Image (tube, rainbow, N blue to C red):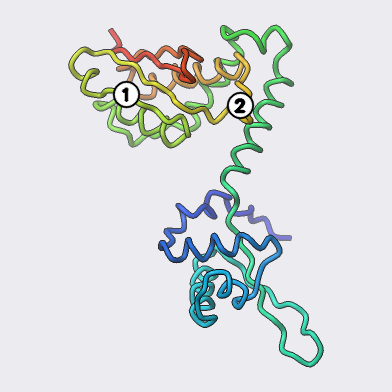
Amino acid sequence: MSTHTPRSSTELFPESLHLSPKQREVLKALQEYPQGAKAADVADAMGMHVNTARGHLDELVNAGAVRVITAPAQGRGRPSLIFQVRIPDNRSVAEEYVSLISVLAEMLADKDQLDDFASEQAREIGRRWAQATADKTVNKADALAPLYRTMRDMGFDPVTSIDRFNQTGETDLELHACPFVTAGIRPSPFVCAIHDGYLEQAAVEAGGRLHLTLMPQSGNGVCRVNVKTAS
């Protein structure tokens, strides 16, 4: 029995595969066929010659974005090649993990804790999360820019003024999106406390040069992180 673990799903994201614009177009067309499609089907959908479509599909197979299987032959004809997308739907992946986080939070915390932004248990979860994901290669002399990139890459859609921070030692990091929101339902205070604990530890991992305070749901669909130079 093999002891190898499955590959990480992130390796199948288009961003990891470095696909060309045309390859992304072909991949998008193929995604309309949940059970896969023949090269001729993709060619018809995109208005291109079947040989051109097959060439792009072969490139996607080589890139690991598409798999090809052989369909049973109909009658005396040759077996058909069916191309199937391997790329996950990023939105579905995010929504499923948000649901998982909500379930875990409900199992870990009682009703009072779920409504408690001051929950120490939640903050400890957040601190351990930050420790587990800390980038040890970050230049600690430039603390705010790496924090901004992390919040952006995690899906928080941050907006801030690094110039203001450099001039005054303080600024707000406005978070215009939240990966913990799904179907318009805001996360519990317990989940927000996890994020606050994450930020607390992220400041430590950044060399202790920042003091971060999360202000959830600060109005106008925005959460704010107050960023100050640590005294």
Residue 92 in the image: state x and y as whole percent.
63, 43
Q: Quadrant of the C terminus?
A: top left
Residue that badge 2 annotates: 184
Q: Is residue 125 above or below residue 64?
A: above
Q: Residues within 10 Å of mark 1 (few under 14, many from 20)?
A: some
Mark 1 falls on what kind of element?
A: loop
Quadrant for residue 40, please give it: bottom right
Q: Which residue is mark 1?
A: 160
Q: Compare residues 50 and 169 and report the one nearer the observer.
A: 50
Query: Image check: 207 left or right of 72?
Result: left
Residue displayed at 30% across by 11% down? 230
On the image, the x and y values in percent for residue 88 come to 60, 52
Indicate which label's residue lies in the foreground, 2 or 1. 2
- Residue at figure coordinates x 67%, y 9% from the top left: 113
Please tell me which residue is depicted at 61% across the width and 13% down the height of the picture. 121
Image quarter hosting the N terminus: bottom right
The quarter of the displayed image where residue 99 is located = top right
